[in-house]
Amino acid sequence: MWGEGRNTEQRKTEKKRERFFSRMRNSFQLRVLLSILLPIIIFCVLTNIVISTLLGRQLMEKREDVERGYLSVVYSYLEDVRENVDTLALLAENSSSVRWTMMKSGLDTMETKKTALAAQSSLLASLNGNPVSRYVDSMIIVNRQGMQIAVTDTQKIISAEEIFSSPLFQGEIPDGKARAALAQSVIDEGKTRLVYVYPLDLEENSYVYIELSTRLFTDVLEPYGDSSNIMIRSTNDELAWYSSENFKQQFESGGMKKGYFRDSMKFAPFSLSAELMIKNDMYTPDNIYILYVLLVIVLLVTALGITVSRIISSRITKPLRHLSGHISRLSVQNELTAEPSIEQGGDEIAGIGRAFNRLVRHINDLIREQKEMLEQKQRLEMNALQAQINPHFLYNTLDSIRWMAVIRKANNISDTIMSLENLLRNMAKGAGDQIPLREELSLARDYVNLQQVRYMGIFDYECEVPEELMDFRIVKMTLQPIIENAIFHGIEPTGTYGVIRVQAEERDGELYISVEDNGAGAESEELRVSMKERKNKNAMSGMGIGNVDERLKMTYGEKYGLICEGQKGKYTRITIHVPAEREEKEQEI
C-alpha cells in the first residue's frame, strides 16, 4: 500500500511538471521573448570575446606604462630625499658659527660654548623645517680633533673616533662632496641606517654626519602595495624593501621567476636601485574588470529585450489585466462600481467588460431594492407596534385618571400619568423617521420620569445639552433604548444610587450625543457583544442598542452609529455619532 501511494504521488508530480512545461511551450509571451533575446545574446557574446581580446593587449601595455610611472615616482622621491639632505649639509657649510666652532678642538672657552650652542640651535631649526626631518635619527657636526655639535638628541655619547670608524670615511670622497650608502649605525649598534657624510672644508677636517631611518623606503613603497610590485635594493643585494608582504614572500620564494619581467632604475647617490616586477599576463584584474563590464552590458541588453517583449505582450494582455485588476479591487471594497475604461475597444475583451459592468449595475439594483424592502419592513414593524393599542381610548383613560389624581391632590401620580401619556403620544406619531433633538430629549425625559417612580429615585438624570444643538435632527427613538440599557444593566445591578448623564457637542460638522452612567460598568468586549442584540423583549420599545446602531447606519451611512466605551465597575458610555443636520424648516428660512 505504501508503495502504491508513493507511485501515485510521483505520477501527480510528473503530471504537474508536464502541464507547466506545456504552458511554457505554448506561451506567446515566451516566444516573443526568445525571438528578441537569442539574436541579441549571440551578438553580445561574440562582441564580448573580440573586444576583450583587443582591449586586453592594450590594457596590458597601458598597465606597464603606469607601473613604470610608479617606479619613476619612487626614483624622484629618492632624489628629493638626497636634495633635502644636501640642503641641510649646505646650511651647515655656510654657517659661520659652525665653521668657527669646527676650527676648535674642544669647548674650552665660554665663547666657544656660546658659538656651538648658537650653531646647534640654527641647525636644529633648519632640520625641523626640512621635509626629511622625520627620518633623521642622528645629525652630528664633527671634526677630526674631537669637536662635535650634536643637532639631534642621542641616547649615548659617541666619540669622534667612533664616527670616523664608519665605512663611509674609508677612502676618498669623490669630488670632495657628499657620500651616502647603507651601513651599520655607529649610534644604534646592530641596526642599518642610510648614512650620509658631507665634508665642510677642502681639507676634509670637519664633516656633517647624518643617519637616516630606513622607514623612508617602506613609507615611499606603501602606497603601491595593492597596485604594483616595487622594491628598493642595495647594489650588493644584501638588503631590500618591498611594497607589500605578499610581494616579498613571492619574490624570496622564487615564485616570480616565471611569468614576470623586471625593470629597474639605479640611484647611484645612495648606492640603491628601484626595481619593478611586471606580470606578463593579459588576464589581469583590469582586464577581468573589462570582461565583467561587458558581461553587465550583456545582462543589460537582455533586460532591455525582456522589457521590449513585455511591452509588446502587454499591448495584448493589458485589457485582460485591467479587467482582472478591477475585479480584484471590487473583491475588497464595500461597494460595487462600474468601470467605463474596461469597455473601451471593439474586441472580445471589451465585450466581456461591458457584460461585467451590466452585471455590476444589476447587482447594485438588487442591493438597493433589498435595502428598501428592509426599511419598509422596519417601518411596518414600528407601525404594527404602535397600532397594538387604541391610542385615543388609552389617552382618554389616562387623562381621566390624571384628573382624579389632581382632584385628590396626588401630584406625584398626576405627573407620572402625564409623563406616560406624553411618552405614548410621541411614540404613536408617525410623521417621519427623524425629529429635532429637542423632541427626542423630551421623549427621553418622560421615560426617565416613569423609571424614577418605578425605582423610587435610586438614580438621577442630568441633561447637559446646549440650546444651540436642540434643532439638530436625529432618528426617532434613539436615546430611549440607550437610557433604558443604562438603567437595567448599569444602575439596577449595583443596588446603589447612580447618575445617568446625557451630553452633546458638535465637532467638524458631526453631532456626538453621549449617554453615560456610573453603574456596574462593562468592558469594551462585552459592549461589542451586546451591540449584536437587535431586540430586547423586556424593553419598552422592544428594541436593543444593536437595533439602534443598525438604524443609524442605514439612515446616515456606515461611518455613523454607536461608539461604546466602558470599564468594569466604573462606568459605561455610549456615544451617538450622526451628521449635524438642522431641521428642514430652519434651513429653508
Image (cartoon, rainbow, N blue to C red):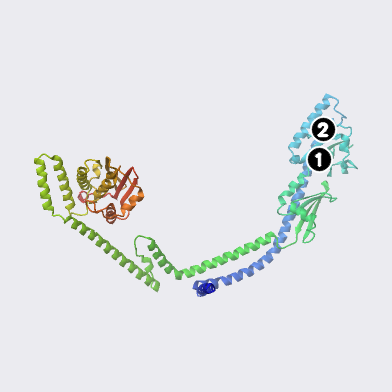
- Which numbered disc, 2 or 1, marks the residue closer to the eye? 1
Q: Where is residue 99 in the image (x, y as percent from the top left)?
A: 84, 32
Q: Horizontal and vertical percent for residue 487?
A: 26, 46
- Tell me whether the residue at label 2 lies in contact with that at label 1, contact meaning CB atoms closer than 8 angstroms: no
Q: Return the residue nearer the eye: 303 or 424.
A: 424
- Is residue 180 in sight in this rendering? no
On the question of residue 112 being in view, the answer is yes
- The amino acid type found where label 1 is placed reads Glu
Q: Describe residue 204's horizontal placement relative to residue 477 as left or right.
A: right
Disc 2 marks which residue?
A: 149
Q: Is residue 101 above or below residue 181?
A: above
Residue at the image point whose x is 9% and y is 46% from the top: 400
Image x and y of residue 124, in percent: 76, 34
What number is the disc on residue 211?
Answer: 1
- The answer to which image quadrant residue 131 occupies is top right
* Element class at badge 1: strand
- CA–CA distance in space, label 2 to label 1: 15 Å
Sequence-wise, the earlier of marks 2 and 1 is 2
- Give the image quarter of residue 142: top right
With respect to residue 201, does 393 lie above or below? below
Q: How many marks?
A: 2
What is the three-letter code of the residue carrying label 2?
A: Ile
**Image coordinates for residue 33, horizontal then vertical, percent:** 53, 71
